[in-house]
Amino acid sequence: MAMHRHDKATGKSAAAAAINRRQATAVLLASAAAPFTAGAQQDAAATTASAASSATAPSTTLWPGDDWAESTPEAQGMDSAALAKLVDFGAAQGMDSLLVTRHGSLVAEAFYAPYREGLKHAVNSTTKGVVATLTGMAIQDGLIASRDAPVLEFFADRKVANVDAAKKAMALGHLLDMTSGLHWIEPLSDAVPETMLQLGRARDWQGFVLDRPMAQAPGAGFNYNSGNTHLLSAIVAQKTGGSTLAYAQKRLFGPLGITDVRWRKDPQGLEVGGWGLYLHPRDMARIGYLYLRRGQWNGRQLLPAAWVEQVFNPVVDMGFGSAAPAFKYANGWWSIPSKRAYFTAGFNRQLIVVLPDIDVVVAVTGRRNYPLPAFIDHITAAVRSREPQPANAAAQELLAARIRDAGVDKPSPNPVGPTPELAATVSRKAWLLERNALGLQRLVLDLTPANPRYEASFDPGRPDVPREPVAGPLGLDGKYRTAPQGPNAVVSVKGHWLDAQTFQLVSRSVADGEVTVLTLKFEGGGAAVNVGVENNWGFKGQVRGAGAS
């Protein structure tokens, strides 16, 4: 069953192997909420198209009001047929939503079923870019002196462990650029994010991060660390006299017209600095547009232009090696300098992409990772010129058709076979499961074609799982059945028989981008069940269960 989780944390199932980064991510990201739901590429040419490279902002700047202005792609110098290919790319790569703006107008927007318009989506580590932005605003407001401010001075009331000359030299800018020097294991690979798991289990997250020993001098090199931005959240909250969210509502969300957000908190009630934020895709694009316009919004300089220029001229290499184009980092943002692409990046491709050379902002949510250079190339390939292009009704209809198709739930490729006799035996029976990492204790399935449904109950001692049973319809025809499970919590579930003894259930926590697959192998004529669990965050495990007497 999918459950909302943070970026990573562990638990052991009865037969779970050692976890990797994606498996660990599966458990921490789930702590954010809890309804039941079930590679590097060679760099392309640095300039994709000469016409695109010369495109700049229009002479008259549009600003989103209550909503974005909408336009045909051709009116903004883009090609509808190329954007249709981008929508297809999104479908093939597991996107939940795709939004493209140019010159301040919305030119394409797709929602991939069962995700739909109106749902906030977990943005995972894109949260880091938001917290960094708030840090820049606090510096502009004079609440924080500068990027050079020593970190430990903000925590003078704490007794910090492992203090040495290196830790005393750690400055705000080192947190912003992931060069703090703290000993932290959270690699951007499939390796186990050991320190992040420990953070998720800590009672005092700020203290846990501050107490880490130093592995190298501040500024010596890039090392990805969600603890860095959690300290930034603590500093912003402290210096603004309230909470990170309250300051965001005043200085960022409010001025940009962002009114509907959700933000997970740590055990002390502080907004998590490394993940945990939920945004609407159109609001993600507003944040990107603020950066595209160098920190200005409708006549107000909300963020120092120099702050944005640091993002657009990064110096910290992320160390991905020669197999990929160089990635760099600055102020909580990633970049591929050879493509003039700047973006926040959350696990499973929650992206705010800013392409200043072609005056484009793209917002993406999704369910899995894919090569970022190829994605950037698809975007730039859709730009034809700075000026409007002739209308192209056929291409525009092609794009509209692709967008409509994205919003339609497709049947599973697996053929729906006949219902086996065992379905009647196992239906409506309560399956009591051994203790497991998901916290799932009891599962009831009705697999009869007349009214297929599920009901799941979880460990009442776990704070990261639903307290009440979660229930809803279950599609047996290859299509999802969707039911709300609380505010912004929508669960879509379907299933099919793999053979006469094995039923596979696919569950999606739609707003979290989580997909969980349960494979139930019934044994002893329906007296017992062996459940295989796998999700798109890399979690895998096995748990056994027996029918309640």
Image (cartoon, grey):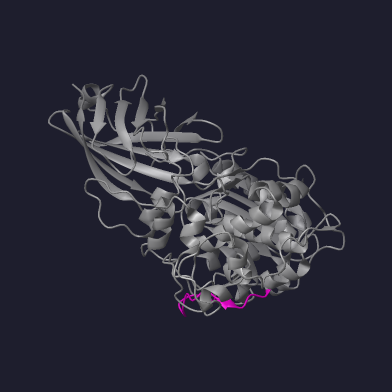
Work out whether residue 65 or residue 416 is closer to the camera in this orientation and state it.
Answer: 65
**Which residue appears at 52% of the width and 80% of the height?**
220
x, y percentage for residue 32?
49, 44
Image: 352 above or below 478: below
x, y percentage for residue 294?
76, 65
| Left or right: where 147 falls relative to 105 | left
Work out whether residue 472 or residue 232 is closer to the camera in this orientation and state it.
Answer: 232
Q: Is residue 275 visible?
A: yes
State which quadrant residue 389 falls in. bottom right
x, y percentage for residue 524?
12, 31
Q: Quadrant of the C terminus?
A: top left
The magenta span reads 313-326
Q: Quadrant of the N terminus?
A: top left
Work out whether residue 533 or residue 387 is closer to the camera in this orientation and state it.
Answer: 533
x, y percentage for residue 157?
58, 59
**Which residue appears at 30% of the width and 50% of the height?**
540
Work out whether residue 373 or residue 64 is closer to the camera in this orientation and state it.
Answer: 64
**Which residue appears at 38% of the width and 31% of the height?**
477
Name the dominant secondary structure of the magenta segment: loop
State which quadrant residue 418 falls in. top left
Q: Is residue 193 visible?
A: no
Q: Magenta stretch containing residue 205, yes or no? A: no
**Which residue appears at 41% of the width and 66% of the height?**
185
In the picture as drawn, the residue positioned furthest to the left comes out as 524
| Left or right: where 70 falls relative to 479 | right
In the picture as drawn, the residue positioned furthest to the top comes out as 450
